[in-house]
Amino acid sequence: MAHDPDYTDVLIIGAGISGIGAAYRIHEKNPNLSYTVLERRERLGGTWDLFRYPGIRSDSDIFTLCFPWEPWTRPEMIADGEHIWQYLADTARKHGIDKHIRFNTHVRSADWDSGTDTWTVRTEQEGAEKTYRARFLFFGTGYYNYDEPYRPEFPGIDDFTGDVIHPQHWPESFDYTGKRLVVIGSGATAVSMIPTLTEKAGHVIMLQRTPSYMISATKVEPPAVTLRKVLPLRAAHWIVRWRNALVGSLLWLVARKAPEFTKRMLRRIAERNLPEGYDIDTHFNPPYNPWDQRLCFILSADLYKAIARGDVDVVTDHVDHMDATGIVLKSGRHLDADVIITATGLQLQALGGIELSVDGERVNPHDRFLYRRHMLEDVPNAAWCVGYTNASWTLGADLTAQSVAKLLAYMDSHGYTHAYPHRGDIEMPEQPAFNLKSGYVLRALDVLPKSGTRRPWMLSHNFLRDALAHPFEDIEESMVFGRVPAAALRSA
Ligand SMILES: Cc1cc2nc3c(=O)[nH]c(=O)nc-3n(C[C@H](O)[C@H](O)[C@H](O)COP(=O)(O)OP(=O)(O)OC[C@H]3O[C@@H](n4cnc5c(N)ncnc54)[C@H](O)[C@@H]3O)c2cc1C
């Protein structure tokens, strides 16, 4: 295949955390394999390039969100979006991954041919069609639609004479100095944005239908900084990363096993920081258990402090309709606004919206069970990268990248040209791939692949168990391996 410049052993789609992580792990274990990264945008970074709203930051600790093989060197534990982007760009450059990225390359479809064990991938590059071919596909395409965020239909929105902005498409240099802002939403985006907005806005209202649980964290954690001063960087990184992964897993476990205790703990943070007599029951007492939806991080209780200062009002109500000057609520109250920010969330999407087929037959991801969090039942030589919803994404993405790297090395050493997971007649109940009851997950139950209830046919949400089991995974379990004759490969 060396004569074909558009053929690579591995095609990675997406140059975000997952794609960059996969490139590193695959090359680390398979330096003989060629790889190319196809990225639809003009810059790498994915989420950390797309989202530019004021206050964009991680909402999990950066030591577990960064790569285990490339230490985070800045002091913050909760990192700003631009620093995460810079880290990803520096990492890609340092490891030579950037040279493999083809930007402005939007992958539209991928078809597997079992006669030649080859994927044919059709892309659009600045309006022109271009085809790539590969033995293995890695979908580092994230989990949501880049073009269309979730926008509920608010009656009368066209009557509003101010600006309506969705955080996924924040206009560059948008000036909101002195303006009255209403942010609709109470998830991680709203909560990380609002304290920053108060620095310039005249006033901010957080309008929520349902409250979220908030946990407070410090931006910089002194023990982690000290550890890096006294120990070599890699050793300190390893310790802090594992410490944070353990603490995060423990917090999640306590929240699931002892929800009432966790509710009391989270309520105490609110009571300590909100003004005396504040109506916590209405505004910060969600009607579900902690971790039924993702827990929101607030930085040193900044949201509560902004409320205490009077910079932010929280309104818990439903939108009835919008009019020229703001929002009319179901209660009849009117919220005056110059700008409405619809922090109403994402639209989930599998495989970056790419049309997938095997021998010309369309594959609907939702009809397939996931195998070990990353392969689709009966789809050869392809992996989809999803991280954890209850821990940093990268903890899961890196396990996937390592599994794929191991599979490729195994195939190479045995001369196999294809491998696919096959369930056969094993029956089991289905469950949604993501274990959250958040709106964006519930809206998309028919979009993502299915999870079973038994390994290896399930998407686990337990990092510690996965990390411990990972080295002992039987690579042949429920997998079908094979090869096509060399003549077919040559003719491909
Ligand atoms: C605002 C926000 C904050 C978040 N904060 C955190 C956090 O603090 N901690 C955490 O663990 N998770 C967080 N997440 C989840 C976050 O998306 C993941 O942590 C991580 O960035 C996902 O990386 P990824 O590479 O899998 O996907 P993405 O970052 O979404 O990158 C996917 C890449 O694939 C490209 N792509 C997609 N489709 C195609 C196609 N058809 N053709 C070519 N290229 C394509 C995209 O352009 C993009 O570059 C956050 C998400 C959002 C939206």
Image: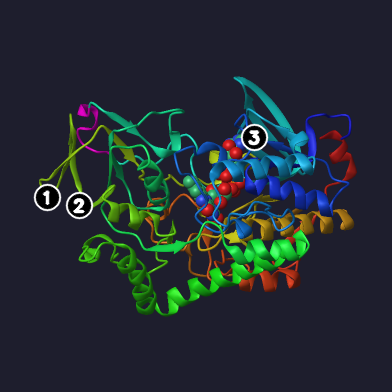
Q: Position of residue 343 (x, y in %)?
A: 36, 44
Which residue is the site of mark 2? Answer: 317
Q: Quadrant of the C terminus?
A: top right
Q: Earlier in the sequence, mark 1 or mark 2?
A: 2
Q: Which mark is residue 331?
A: 1
Task: Give residue 203's quadrant in the image.
Answer: top left
Nearest to viewer (mark 3 / mark 1):
1
Quick one: 189 or 453, which is closer to the camera? 189
Q: CA distance from mark 3 to mark 2?
A: 41 Å
Q: Which mark is residue 452?
A: none
Q: Mark 3 CB in 8 Å range of ligand 1? A: yes
Task: Give residue 132's quadrant in the image.
Answer: top right
Horizontal arrangement in the rendering, residue 101 relative to residue 54 (left or right): right
Give the secondary structure at mark 2.
Answer: loop
Q: Earlier in the sequence, mark 3 or mark 1?
A: 3
Q: Mark 1 CB in 8 Å range of ligand 1? A: no
Nearest to viewer (mark 3 / mark 2):
2
Q: Earlier in the sequence, mark 3 or mark 2?
A: 3
How many other residues sit within 10 Å of disc 1, few (<14), some (14-19) or many (≥20)? few
- Determine if the magenta segment contains residue 93: no
* Kind of residue indicated by mark 3: Glu
Which residue is the site of mark 3? Answer: 39
Q: Is residue 289 above or below residue 314?
A: below
